[in-house]
Image (spheres, rainbow, N blue to C red):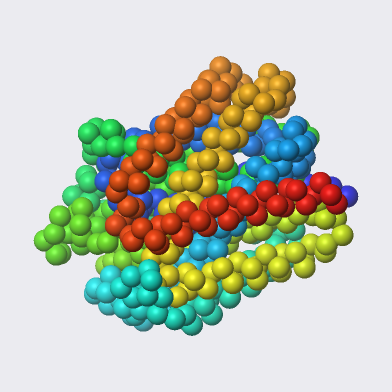
Amino acid sequence: MKEKWDNRLAFILAAIGSAIGLGNFWRFPYIAYRYGGGAFLIPYLVALFTAGIPLLILEFTLGHKTEHGAPLAFGSYRKNWKWLGWFSIAVAFGIVTYYTVIMSWSFIYFFHSFSLSWGSIPELFFNKMVLEITDSPFNLGGINYIILIFLIVTWIAIYYSIYHGVKTVGKVVYVTVILPWLILLVLIIRGITLPGALEGLSYYLTPNFAALKDPTVWINAYAQIFFTLSVGLGIMIAYSSYLPRKADIVNNAFIIGFANCFTSFLAGIAVFSSLGFLAYQTGKPVSDVVASGPGLVFVAYPTIINMLPFANKIFGALFFVMLLTLGIDSAFSLVEAASKAALEQWKKIPRRALNLLISIIAIIVGLIFSSRGGLYWLDIIDHYISTYGLVVVGFLEAIFIGYLINTKSFQDYMNKQSEIMAGKWWLYSIKIVVPVVLLVAIVYNTINELRTPYEGYPKLALNFGFAFILLLLIISILLSRKQRRL
Ligand code: TRP
């Protein structure tokens, strides 16, 4: 029996559930801060329209038309392109190994909320008490067992949420999608009424046209769009393969794209107003009031929570529960996509055993991010995986659909399914804009990185980051080879 979504809303909510996650509340704010606030928003919006939504439409169509997971979706057009599907899933898997570590931090913060134990200097608390951070990536400092324990708890939660397959996914997401918007609203109201908030907001919202010349900002904007929309990860292909035969594709892509990016924008308002407040308190400029890395929001949100007029503790706890629920539906969307891909090839494996295997391997890889030097590795791997993994997959998808198959009949199918037509705009995006822009961004970025090492990390550490991507690529090619023989 084929699995299907109960109705259209269930699909939209599940797709939004996959899209909205830590990418909006954790990654977007720190990337926007790192690349200059107002310098980032324009490239981000350009990336949404020129690549995010067109590729979302592409992946929905591909999944719906072929009714397959990513490897076979590509493979059903061209046998020797299955590896691209596997690569997208391998990239998603790479992401989930550290994504769940951020969820583990959120768990820890949930417990600290009850006593507001981060005190008045949340940055110090994060580095010294939670991470116990070392001084360099080559000083791992042993495993931080608290982080590891909650990493395991996180995986148990993920495993149980997908226990019953896609039908439950459709239900769980009602809670995980609606609640966050309410909580965010409260944070924003308190955030923007803090002294100094305006300065933070103006740093976030004032466009900086000079920065548009910097290719690093652009590649990071594209990478963030892919990450946040779950595009280039094989996930949206798998989800749309469960859609009923009659389903609107273009419309759904717009709804999901807008809902998701609007959420990020709002999270940015909360975070930047708290940065403005910190700047006001410390007398430093907004641009260097805290370190702009993956720990940023674990400083920014507690700052606002401290300042709530009442019920801080309860609200803090509620907020971190929200981060967890948001993370869970994103994380299980990956496990769904990966297990769908694998089950289509190795039909005899029991699904639950497979999910268990995926979880265990992810915990093992996650050990490195759970070490005391793990934050550095998280930053490095996240950087390589998003700029090389995600962006390269997006580029190849556009080439594949735009040039290697019958694009016209693909587009006709898409439009037959949709109320709004995706016409010339979509075609030009896929054939010209996406390939050209991404190629230029990749080349510039590579040249740039050879000159100035990412965030000043030691060269050797960065080479490891790059090697990680190559490893994922090799694994994908091996997986697609193996299939042919079975
Ligand atoms: N879109 C999700 C977010 O914004 C992130 C995400 C996409 C993800 N695909 C994933 C996380 C796969 C883990 C695994 O948070």
Q: Percent x, y for residue 382?
A: 45, 56
Q: Percent x, y for residue 366?
A: 54, 69
Task: Residue at 83%, 62% (x, y): give it.
Answer: 349
Q: In this view, does 44 lie above or below 121?
A: above
Farthest residue to the left: give it.
283
Task: Residue at 70%, 62% (x, y): give it.
Answer: 162
Count all numbered tags in the image, as a single digit: 0
Q: In this view, does 119 lie above or below 8?
A: below
Q: Percent x, y for residue 428?
A: 53, 20
Q: Looking at the image, which is closer to me, 111 or 366?
A: 366
Give the side of residue 110 with respect to residue 201, left or right: right
Say whether residue 310 is visible: no
Task: Residue at 40%, 42% (x, y): give it.
Answer: 446
Say whether residue 399 is visible: yes
Q: Percent x, y for residue 13?
A: 61, 48
Give the side of residue 7 with respect to residue 88, left or right: right
Give the side of residue 210 with respect to residue 448, left or right: left
Q: Looking at the image, which is closer to me, 27 or 269?
A: 27
Query: Which quadrant of the figure has residue 397?
Result: top right
Task: Residue at 34%, 53% (x, y): give it.
Answer: 454
Q: Looking at the image, which is closer to me, 480 or 132?
A: 480
Query: Which quadrant of the figure has residue 315?
Result: bottom left
Q: Is residue 417 above or below residue 177?
A: above
